[in-house]
Amino acid sequence: MAFEHITEAINEMKEQGTFRKLVPLESAQGNEVTIDGKSLVQLSSNNYLGLANHPRLKQAAIEAVEHYGAGTGSVRTIAGTFEMHEAFERELAEFKHTEASLVFQSGFATNLGVLSALLGPEDVVISDALNHASIIDGIRLTKAARRIYKHVDLEDLEKALKETQDYRTRLVVTDGVFSMDGNIAPLPAIVELAEKYDAAVMVDDAHASGVLGKNGRGTVNHFGLDGRVALQVGTLSKAIGVLGGYVACSQDIRDYLIHKGRPFLFSTSHPPAVVAANREAIRVMKEEEELFDKLWANTEFFKNGLRDLGFDIGHATTPITPVMLGEETLAHSFSDKLKEHGVFAQSIAFPTVERGKARIRTIVTAEHTRDDLERALEAFKTVAEELNVTLHA
């Protein structure tokens, strides 16, 4: 029978307790969401600033639909570039302090398009071991040589740079914020090493866009490295609250990607509502700075609360806080129990993370109230007691 191995794999996951179903939300994304008719504190969304349901973004989207319609009817390179697409890219480049920017359909598509287009057999890509799956898949699409350096290990990175000096282009690629652990890349040291060995740097700021830097400009701005990083990739679907991905770069690279970036070339352009909402999100981030204050105050409160209870939260320094549990079945059971106690916090296990490093990945947002977070902490404590999880308070 065709695909019999797929059925076997599904059955094996079910037997091992690692099979998970999609969880449909019955409400807008917010500090609380409705699932199966029950209101739960949301701790699994990337909606860091609460922009996904922000009234200014919704109004911008509605007006765009009324004026421009529901869709664009074409790819960007034929008839699908509206003036609003290019206006947004100009605003985004100004926001990121770069010469130009180009928007793709998603952050995943951006990494695929950028890496596959810019690197050839004469080049080498040097990538952090814990980079996002989209970077890994983008590297697989290139004909470039590749080196993987140990996670945030600067000595190993320098060794790779020394050993690859004969290549035309050496591109060091790193996440700005690592999505599963919540730690920030040591970007200043990475940039200094790259400059020392005449290499370029690409930063994926998916979880730093809208979180780090002035008004959420990302890790490059956060560390005062504007102008020293060749490629800044980010998403428009996490803190920005809508949909899409982008690369902030030089004008030449933008022009080249328009001609050679396959996801850009062969995908219909974003609908007017998406473009308008993204533009409004950037303006909100510039004007409503109190959102960032609330985000970081909530982050500190929740991290301290988990530590005080005795949970292992690793070395996270961003709103991403992993609650390390180890075994996959325990993490899944813990997540299910949290839901019973009014908290939606998804478990993360292999293959997203290494075996034995399963966790509950939590993300606080600017929308959470202190009451939300206190309820969540109480639920974590209760579930740990019910499942006999050893804490270290």
Image: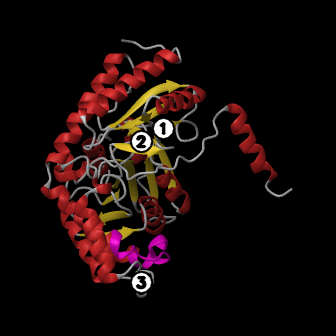
- Give the labeled residue for mark 1: 346
Give the percent coordinates (x, y) of residue 292. Answer: 19, 45
User: Helix or strand or loop: what does disc 3 sit on?
Assistant: loop
- Tell which circle, 2 or 3, labels the residue nearer the N-terminal end: 2
Disc 1 marks which amino acid? Gln
Q: Nearer the viewer, mark 1 or mark 3?
A: 1
Task: From the image, tell me which residue sits under label 3.
Answer: 77
**In the current view of this chain or complex, which residue is farthest to the right?**
1
Q: Answer with the quarter of the image where residue 323 lies.
A: top left
Tell me if I can see residue 64 in this picture. yes
Query: Does the residue at mark 1 contact the one at mark 2 (Cβ under 8 Å)?
Result: yes
Question: Which tag is nearer the camera, tag 2 or tag 3?
Answer: 2
| Magenta-drawn stretch contains 162 | no
From the viewer's side, name the closer residue of 295 and 149: 295
Q: Amino acid at mark 3?
A: Thr
Tell me how far mark 2 sits from mark 3, CA to CA. Answer: 36 Å
Q: Quadrant of the N terminus?
A: bottom right
Q: Secondary structure at mark 1?
A: loop
Q: Nearer the viewer, residue 259 or 91?
A: 91
Instruction: Tell me: residue 198, above or below residue 332.
Output: below
Left or right of 8 in this view: 211:
left
Report which residue position mark 2 lands on: 44
Q: Is disc 1 surrounded by few (<14), some (14 to 19) or many (20+) residues within 10 Å? A: many
Q: Residue at x 22, y 38 (%)?
A: 296
Residue 320 is left or right of residue 370, and the answer is right
Asked if 320 appears above or below 263 in the picture, the reply is: above
Part of the protein shown in magenta: 258-274
Task: Quote the CA–CA distance across marks 1 and 3.
Answer: 39 Å
Asked whether 75 or 58 is in front, the reply is: 58
Disc 2 to disc 3: CB gap under 8 Å: no
- Which label was assigned to residue 30? none
